[in-house]
Structure formats: structure tokens, C-alpha cells
Amino acid sequence: MNIRALEHGEVNICIEQILSEDREEKFGTDGRKRKHLAYALMDGDKMLGGVTGRLESQGFHIQGLGLEKEIRGKQYGTELMKKIEEAAIKEGAKQLTVSTQDYQALGFYEKLGYSVFGKLKDWPFEGTTKYYLWKKVEEAN
């Protein structure tokens, strides 16, 4: 046996299969629901920002949110978050998570109802803090 570098996707597929088999062995089934969601803010054909996330069973993680600098502070981020949260809830999410840096959007997420459940100082570099946030959501009707 040996260890070698491969493309992220190749390794990820292998790991997902191994973890799926492990869950099935321990819990009798791997009935987890997995789905990626993404929304873009468009101005004609130009993408000005967007939000992405991944559903894992009943949990949804916001993987990224970004807007062009000139349109920040105009509620577009809030609109994108509401859109992806609604879609995640319709897909069965009961909790949402997101992470952010101290110099990014901590206050923004807190205003949207997210609560800090953890932080990591000096990550990814000295002098910054990474925050992990969580939000319990209501089920879709």
C-alpha cells in the first residue's frame, strides 16, 4: 500500500462511500438526505453574489455567502439567506449552521437569529477568530 495525492473529488467520493457503509452498519440504514442548494443574485447576466449550502439529513450548513462590495449593506445578503433557509426547511432541515470570521459577518448572522456555539481563536491565522453559529428552525407547513 502507498499514499498519494489525488483530486479532491476522487477522494471525497471514496470517503462518502466508506462513511455511508459505516452508518448503515451502525444504524441499519443510511437514510440521510443530502442535497446542495445555491442561489445567485443576478443583474441581467452578471452574477453579483450568491449563497450555497448543503443539506445533511435534518441539518443544513451554509457553505458560503458573498456579495460584490458595492452592493453590500443593501439587504441583498438577508434576501439570499432567507431564500436558502426557506428552501432548506422545505427539504426537511430543522437546524442551520454557518461559520464566519471575526472580520466578516458575525453580527449579520446574529441579526438573522443565529447563535454562537463555538469559536476558534487564531484561526486561520493569528489575530483572528472563527465563529460557529447555529439556528433552530420551524418546519415547513
Image (cartoon, grey):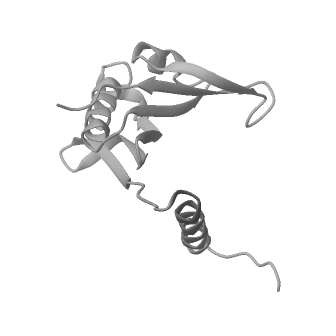
Task: Tell me the residue at 31%/19% (across/down).
Answer: 74
Extreme residue toward the front, this view: 28
Task: Tell me the residue at 26%/47% (across/down).
Answer: 46
Q: Is residue 34 left or right of residue 117?
A: left
Occupied quadrant, residue 14: bottom right
Q: Is residue 53 left or right of residue 128?
A: left
| Residue 102 visible in the shown view | no
Is the residue 18 above or below the residue 48 in the image?
Answer: below
Is the residue 1 above or below the residue 58 in the image?
Answer: below
Is the residue 121 above or below the residue 19 in the image?
Answer: above
Image position, residue 87 (x, y; %): 26, 40
Image position, residue 115 (x, y; %): 52, 18
Q: Nearer the viewer, residue 65 or 22?
A: 22
Image position, residue 26 (x, y; %): 59, 59
Q: Is residue 72 left or right of residue 2?
A: left
Image position, residue 96 (x, y; %): 43, 33
Task: Tell me the residue at 80%/78% (across/down).
Answer: 3
The quadrant of the picture occupied by the C terminus is: top left
Q: Nearer the viewer, residue 114 or 139?
A: 139
Q: Nearer the viewer, residue 51 or 61?
A: 61
Extreme residue toward the bottom, this view: 1
Occupied quadrant, residue 8: bottom right
